[in-house]
Image (cartoon, coloured by chain):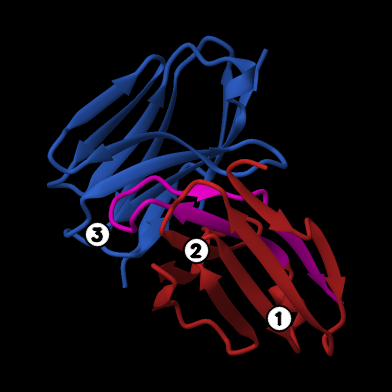
Amino acid sequence: GENVEQHPSTLSVQEGDSAVIKCTYSDSASNYFPWYKQELGKRPQLIIDIRSNVGEKKDQRIAVTLNKTAKHFSLHITETQPEDSAVYFCAANTGGFKTIFGAGTRLFVKA
Amino acid sequence: ETGVTQTPRHLVMGMTNKKSLKCEQHLGHNAMYWYKQSAKKPLELMFVYSLEERVENNSVPSRFSPECPNSSHLFLHLHTLQPEDSALYLCASSQGTISHEQFFGPGTRLTVL
């Protein structure tokens, strides 16, 4: 079945630095890639998504890139702030009913 | 209430108990999901309902039984659970199931003794 690998599992950065989280997927039919942020004790919330017909998408300090050939996609957060500290999940969807999530990356932003 | 709500927020049950988790969405969505979230593991999709019909049953043990009486409500009936079933159970909804943002509820923290 489809699998989504996410790295690193934990990431610690200094406030103001950039953070990059990488994911790979196995099913080449995947065409929708959302990223969710889950703050401690709260529900996951969508922060950005990208579809397979686009290579890059940016929204203020966050950006996502997609390499369909390599089946990689990445989340980039610039100018990190303490409120960016959370668990981030990547996911892949083939256009059907099932979205496969990565195991999550715990991001710590040190003030 | 707005968004997706879940009750109860916390549940402790013995292995012989029967309990139910409830989810309600106030977003007018037509698809609802149950996920299991365990520590350091990916979110595991359990069930998907589209227009009140189950469209995905992700090899979940029969001790978990979903019910979707209408497009706004989703239940997860639990019986004879095992300690390894202890986890956070998240409900989500979306407008359509194909490549759409999912809106999550706050979850039910389940502990099986």
Horizontal and vertical percent for residue A18?
A: 45, 18
Co-location on one chain, circles 2 and 3: no
Q: Is residue B108 magenta?
A: yes
Helix, strand, or loop for circle 1?
A: strand
Mark 2 — on which chain does it sit?
Answer: B
| Residue A102 visible in rendering | no
Badge 3 marks a residue whose secondary structure is loop
In this picture, residue A79 sits left or right of residue B15: left
Q: Disc 1 and disc 3: Cα gap in Å?
A: 30 Å
Look at the picture and state if A88 lies above or below A63.
below
Q: Is residue A19 visible?
A: yes
Q: Is residue B109 magenta?
A: yes
Q: Which numbered tag is attached to residue B88?
A: none
Kind of residue at badge 1: Leu
Q: Colour of chain B?
A: red
Residue behind mark 1: B78
Decide: is A99 above or below B14: above
- Residue A73 or residue B72, whichever sits in front: B72
Within the image, what quadrant is residue A14 found in?
Answer: top right
Measured as percent of width and height from the top left, residue A82 is found at: 64, 18
| Element on which disc 2 rests | strand
- The residue lying toward the viewer, choosing from A92 and A10, is A92
**Chain under numbered label 3:** A
Question: In the rendered structure, which amino acid carries the disc numbered 2?
Answer: Tyr
- Do badges 1 and 2 share one subunit? yes
Q: Position of residue B101 (x, y in %)?
A: 39, 45
Q: Start and end of the magenta stretch?
A: B87-113
What residue is shown at x 52% (from left), y 16% (from top)? A80
In the rendered structure, are the residues bearing label 1 and label 2 in contact, judged by CB atoms less than 8 Å apart? no
The residue under label 2 is B33
Q: Tell me, what hue is chain A?
A: blue
